[in-house]
Image (spheres, rainbow, N blue to C red):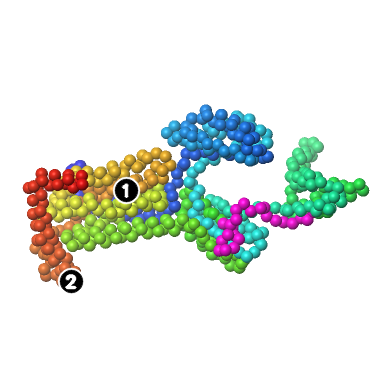
Amino acid sequence: MNSLIAFFARKRLFGDLLTLIVIVVGLASTLLVRRETFPNVNFDILVISTFFQGASPEESEKLVTNPLEKELKEVDGIKKMLSYSGENRSEITLFLDPDQTTESKAKDDVQSVIDRLTLPAASEKPKVIAINSKLTPIIEVTLSGDMPDLELRRMARDLEDELETVSGIARVAPSGLRDEEIRVEADPRKLAAFRISLDEVVRALQAQNVTVPAGSIEPRSLAITESERIVRTVGDFKSPDDVGATVIRANDLGQPIRVRDIALIRPSLEKPKIISRALGLPGVSLTVLKKEKADAINVVDKLKAKIDSLRPRLDPRLKLSYVNDFSKFVKRRIGVLSGNLYLGLVLVLIMLALILEIRVALLVSLGIPFAFLGTMAIFHNWGFSLNLVSLIGFIIVSGMLVDDAIVVTDNAVRLMEEGMDPETAAIEGTQQIWPAVTASVLTTVLAFAPMLFMSGIFGKFIREIPAGVIIALLISLFEAYFILPAHIASYIRVDLKNRYRKESKGLRKKLGQVAEYWDTRVTPAYKRQLGRVIEYRYRMAVALVVLFVG
């Protein structure tokens, strides 16, 4: 280790170039690193959903849930299994053990069990869904206005299509958006007059509201140059007129009786399942989900710009507002981190300038941006992101990044004051204290290291906190051992004759007076007190034990 310190201290140009490279790469990584609300993690949860039309909860449990549970017991890595059987559906939730299986392997095993299982013909094929945080909501856009529900729905659908064209948006999930339907309100008197029951009307509508493939028409012989034609019977209802023209049956004279003859037909919306209001008016909420690799702040900015460009074309009655904008939380925490870093730089410069040379303060302060930018480069390279969780780690470590640099620089300056040349002082000063400084930094590293190995969903979420703290501390340690000595040898000179700047004016004179007071008053007083503590060390030890117990 001593030889490595000496080697790097003598390669001054290499130290300057390495500093420049780390700063440039770190700045580029800071601009490119992904910013999002929470880290992307797999929850190790699989959900098996089966739709069973017309089934009661008892039938769903007996015919779908129980057979699936029985077969799924053979799948390895399932820690816990929960099931729910309700009307028309069955749902089984599997909690996986990450120590025994992976999400992809468990999903394949579950799918193979489903493929060989025979379920009722009326039920749909079960769907296996993995729960993760890849698609995360970042903002909600609410639409409201004093207008008919059909108009509001149409505008919400149009805006949904427009927003999904924004790069970085994976999907827009509407809430409170009811499906369109055509309401058929039969007149009881007309039904009685034509002797038609409601069942006949329902069967007629079901029979004709279908599109059925009817095979194909092939050429009569290979010699004929006709192409094969596919025949399809198209009967889907497109408008209320199509529903009204549906024939129920013919009367005794052979005249068709149509739906419009016995019912009032009008466009409508399904009954509301969720009542949504915004700004005191009926509304619709569009939840925007971003893609896994997209930047949350950039996506929200693009979305707002897109909406601003669409406003002139929108109905003046339509009111738009933003709710649950998670990008604001990310911006706010990044602001806290930036403020801590700037404040740390200023305080380090002020405190060191009061005691040491201003060049010493500048070199020591360089350790803060160097460690932070180096961490940003590693985060970007490893696919980590800046989120509400990882930023906690950066905020914690921002006040620890210059501790080792202060000790190394101060020891080197002390040796210069004793007569050593700058290069020798930088090498000797670092070699003398690197074991103690390493032990000091490693105590913090080891305090955060267990968090890297926490299990469960909570462990996955907070893993980036200790990663940020440990990486930043190790980079600051690297800078203190292999780059800072070269800078000390190149840029720091101790002028004992003009140390207190008695002939200087203004700020330099004030700083000289503070340095003189520190050296002539504070340091001797501290030495005297330290001597007394060492002289009565046993009494001090007993007093500390009593104080600790108390």
Residue placed furthest toward the top: 74
Between disc 2 and disc 1, the foreground one is 1
Label 2 Cα crowd, 10 Å radius (few <14 / some 14-19 / many 20+): few
Q: Say which mark, if any, is on residue 469.
A: 1
Part of the protein shown in magenta = 263-285
Answer above or below: position of 514 versus 489: below
Q: Amino acid at mark 2?
A: Gly
| Residue 113 place in picture, x, y as percent | 56, 30
Circles 2 and 1 in contact, beta carbons < 8 Å? no
Q: Amino acid at mark 1?
A: Val
Residue placed furthest toward the left: 535
| Residue 141 place in picture, x, y as percent | 54, 58
Label 2 sits on residue: 506
Task: Report the magenta stretch's main SS.
Answer: strand
Answer above or below: position of 342 versus 230: below
Alpha carbon distance from label 2 to label 1: 40 Å
Label 1: element kind: helix
Left or right relative to 483: residue 223: right
Left or right relative to 416: residue 53: right
Residue 57 shows in the view: yes
Quarter of the figure that contains the N terminus:
top left
Q: Residue at x 36, y 47 (%)?
A: 465
Answer above or below: position of 402 versus 545: below
Label 2: element kind: loop
| Residue 548 place in picture, x, y as percent | 20, 46
Mark positioned earlier in the residue sequence (2 or 1)? 1
Q: Residue at x 50, y 42 (%)?
A: 131
Say which of 381 and 540 sits in front.
540
Q: Residue at x 23, y 57 (%)?
A: 363
Label 1 Cα crowd, 10 Å radius (few <14 / some 14-19 / many 20+): many
